[in-house]
Amino acid sequence: MSGTIADNLAFIRKKIAQAALRAGRDPAEVRLVAVSKRVESDRVLEAARAGQHLFGENYLQEAREKIAACSSVSLEWHCIGHLQSNKAKEAARLFTVIHSVDRLKLATALDRHAGEAGKKLTVLVQVNVGGEQQKEGVTPLAARELLQRLKQLPNLAVAGLMTMPPWSPDPEEVRPFFRQLREMARHFAEEGLLCSPGRPELSMGMSGDFEVAVEEGATLVRVGTSLFGARQ
Ligand SMILES: *Cc1c(COP(=O)(O)O)cnc(C)c1O
């Protein structure tokens, strides 16, 4: 993409709205997470001036510096990357939502630090829907047990699921994985394992496939390259 950030943002928002309407959904159900990893804070502020207030970061140290550099405006920050348990304290302070909870040890640490900070932290469970060796996330089979454990943690609000499906140049090939995540979330919501059963959060879809993800029920799409251009 070669437009300005404002142009790209308008284009992405239009595509999200059109995809939602194609699926008979209200476009307002879908939130755009602007993925700002390796994007300088001045460009984050440019996106903020164009009306984008929700950003996703992958790396804690980078996020800490950028969040401080952007503190002149009121922005919301989500953690979308792999998180080590020993970084849970700072993550619980910096972020409003952690998309990448995939093990009990991390969840327990987040719960403890959220409790100490007197806040309830919203988290999503990351599911490795493709069962790929190198990917983070619990397997679909292990997800229910993890959710049952997370339900016992008083300072976490487990709102839904997140996934990074196997990569394909053809978004239609990814569609079944998005559908699978939606069905899993529906079952878990029915079983009382999610905090907002009527509307489970589904974090899925990136630059190459966010329209298909929205058609399949995404409530949070994580878009970087299409908004900010190729990363270094
Ligand atoms: C980098 C990243 C994205 C954004 O990917 P793009 O293809 O640049 O839109 C989304 N989700 C996660 C977890 C990422 O690490």
Image (cartoon, helix red, strand yellow):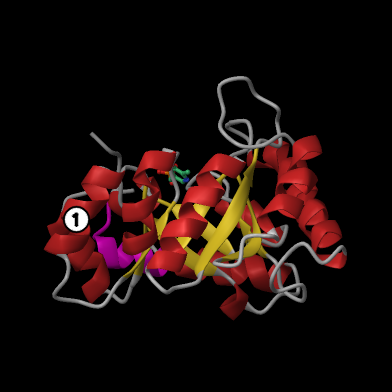
Question: Which quadrant of the figure has residue 90?
Answer: bottom left
Q: Secondary structure at mark 1?
A: helix
Q: Is residue 72 above or below residue 47?
A: below
In the image, residue 109 lies in the stretch drawn in magenta: no
Q: Is residue 191 above or below residue 146?
A: below
Give the side of residue 167 with respect to residue 148, left or right.
Answer: left
**Residue 203 placement, left or right of 44:** right
Secondary structure mainly formed by the magenta segment:
helix
Q: Is 24 located above or below residue 5 in the figure?
A: below
Q: Position of residue 124 (x, y in %)?
A: 59, 56
Residue 97 in view: yes
Ligand 1 quadrant assignment? top left
Question: Which sits in the foreground, 52 or 125?
Answer: 125
Tell me residue 168's x, y (percent): 60, 31
- Residue 111 x %, y %: 51, 58
Q: Is residue 83 left or right of residue 66?
A: right
Q: Residue at x 73, y 41 (%)?
A: 177
Which residue lies at the image location 37% right of the left edge and 69% below the top edge?
Answer: 117
The quarter of the picture where residue 68 lies is: bottom left
Viewer-closest of 199 and 9: 199
Residue found at x 82% / y 54%: 183
Per the image, the residue denoted by label 1 is 66
- Tell me if residue 7 is in the magenta stretch: yes
Q: Depth check: 7 or 71 in front?
A: 71
Instruction: Tell me if mark 1 has few (under 14), some (14-19) or many (20+) residues whose alpha carbon lies within 10 angstroms of its own.
Output: many
Taking the spot 87% from the left edge, 63% from the top edge, the residue there is 191
Residue 122 relative to residue 21: left or right: left
Res 35 visible: no
| Magenta-drawn segment | 2-12
x, y percent for residue 152: 69, 60
